[in-house]
Structures are given as C-alpha cells and as structure tokens.
Amino acid sequence: MSTGALINKLLELYVSMFPIKAAAVVDKDGLIIGSVLSPQVKADDLAIGAVTTLIQSVAERMKKELKMTSRFGTSIIDTEDGKVILVNIGNSGSLTTIAELTVDTDLILSIAYIVVEKLVQIIEDEIYDIEIKLPDLSSKTQKYSYKMCILGDGGVGKTTLLTTFIKGIDRFKQDYKATIGANIMSKDYKLMENLVVSLNIWDLAGQFDYFYKSRQLYLAGSQAIVLVYDATRPETFNNIKKWYDEVIKFVDKDKVEFLLIGNKIDLEDQIKITYEQGKELSKTLKMPFIQTSAKNGNNVDRAFGSLAYNLIKNIK
C-alpha cells in the first residue's frame, strides 16, 4: 500500500470515531499530502467548500509560522466553521483536525496523539506494514498500573518534565536541584474517557557513577523506561547509549516500553542536537522519540500519553 493510501486509510478511521468534519496531513511546506472528509460534509457542497478553504488556510498559516520557528506542539483554534486542532507530526508537518465546536477536545486529542505516532512511523520511519487500528471506546472504565523509570544525566530536566506532566506548567521552576537517589511520584493518566493508566514513576538520580547498586534495585520490575537528554548539551545526548546499556542489564528490553526524549527545545538559540540526530539515535536503539519543553509544556503530555498507550495497546 502506498504512503498516501496508508495515510488516508488511517484518517478515515480517525474521522469515523468522532464528530469530525475533516482531517488532513499537511507537510512543513504547507502541502496537503492526505485528507478525508466526513460523509456529512461530502453530502453538502457548501460544507465541502468551507472545510476545504479552512484546511488550505490552516496549511498556509502553518507554513508561515514554521518559517519563524521550526517547532510547534498542539494548537486549538475556534472558527465559524468548526474547532481546528493542530498536532505536529515529528518534524514533518501536522495533523489538522476540523471538528464540531461542541466536541470533547481532550477525547479527540487522546486519539489524535495515537494517530500522529502512526503517521510518524509512515512518513518519517517509512514503515508501511503498521497496523491501521485505533483503540475501541467501550463503556466500561478500565484501569491499568505500570512502573516507569526516567533516567538521564543531571540537569536534563527529568524532574521538571515530570512536574509539568503531573502538576502543570505553572509549577515549573528555573532553579535546578539534583535528585538524590530516587524521587517517586504517581499519576493516573486518563488515556480516554473510560481508560486510565496509573503510572508509578521513579525519577532516578542523574549521577551515573553514584547510586549504582541502588539504581539496579530501583529498575527492578520496570515496565517502561524513559531516557532524557538536553538538546542544548551534546554530552547528555552522547551519554544516552551509556544509560541504555545500563538499563538493559537489569530489565528485559523485549518486555519494556522505551521512550527517548530530547528536552529543552524552547531554548531555540542554544540547541546543539537536531531533531534528525535524536531521530537517528532512536532508530538505532529501536524506541520512539519526541522533543519536549518542560518549561512551556510543549509535547510533555503527548510524550507520556503515547507511552501510556504503548503500554496498554496489546491488552485484549
């Protein structure tokens, strides 16, 4: 199946799940590389024109914004013709969703993030045998619990990432205080209205040569591992392989979900590690990759949300 056909098949499934008027994949040059209209819109010539014009307007706006800044996260805009939800697709463009104004935005985003992860695999990783399937929304609330450890050099922003994820960006602090040993937190993450993933999060100290014996005890029983580097400090990126090699001494890498995070992308003028470098390392280590900013919240919820989804996606 071609890239375009895969994208449209995924969009068709996405649009069918919610009161969505249209969904489109727009690349960073503002070109629409895939789009799907809902049956209701297709049946109304005026609606087709309005929605098509809105998609083209959003594509042009995104193209202009990306000339000024190479990154954006998630944006929500209310217009006369519907609610526009933009979610970036790695470094390739955005998923543009046009939904009814009354739609539950949180519910749409919970699925949009999953769609985007699949689009990254199709567009950037050139994986064409992925499963075109999205979670089924049943009425019964389900809750699953997992242990997650987050590792990386000191000062990369592990604790601030978790603070932003758990308590919001208003709790972000500029001053740095090193974690000693381990800091344990928890978060009940509502993946969907009826699906909760409870994360027991172990924030491990970034001093690699210390806490070695303690760290192996902390890692025991982990089901998810997050590795973090600071995109402004190349040495923290170079040390990711060292952290990974230590982790797989104590966990079965085939039974653990991994995630690589490049943090501090709000410091655009200071960035030394490009998105492409992070992506290449993630391919080598065979794990998903995302860039974040703990300071402004860019992609933080999405990062941990995608990890939560990967933890439960194979549960029947």
Image: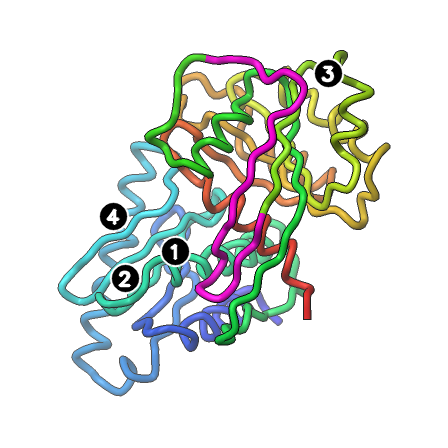
Nearest to N terminus: mark 4 or mark 3: 4
- Residue hosting label 4: 61
Measured along the vertical axis of the image, is residue 173 above or below residue 142?
A: above
Separation of residues labelled 4 and 2 (CA atoms): 10 Å
| Secondary element type, mark 1 | strand
The one nearer the camera, 196 or 206, is 196
**Percent from the top left, x then y, of residue 38?**
34, 78
Amino acid of disc 4: Arg
Cβ atoms at labels 2 and 1 below 8 Å apart? yes
> How many neighbours does mark 3 have within 10 angstroms: few (below 14), some (14-19), or many (20 or more)?
some
Q: Sequence order check: which comes first, mark 4 or mark 1?
A: 1
Quadrant in the picture for the N terminus: bottom right
* Residue situated furthest right in the rendering: 249
Q: Secondary structure at mark 2?
A: helix
Q: Can you identify the residue that label 1 sits on?
A: 26
- The residues bearing labels 2 and 3 have C-alpha atoms spaced at a distance of 48 Å
Whole-percent x and y of residue 232?
A: 51, 18
Real-space Cα separation, disc 1 to disc 3, in angstroms = 42 Å
Q: Are marks 4 and 1 in contact (CB under 8 Å)?
A: no
Closer to the chain start, of discs 2 and 1, is 1
Of 89 and 249, which appears nearest the observer?
A: 249
Would residue 194 be found to the left or right of residue 143 on screen? Answer: left
Q: Which residue is mark 2?
A: 55
What residue is at 32 percent from the left and 59 percent from the top?
A: 105
Type of secondary structure dominating the magenta stretch: strand
Give amino acid for label 3: Phe
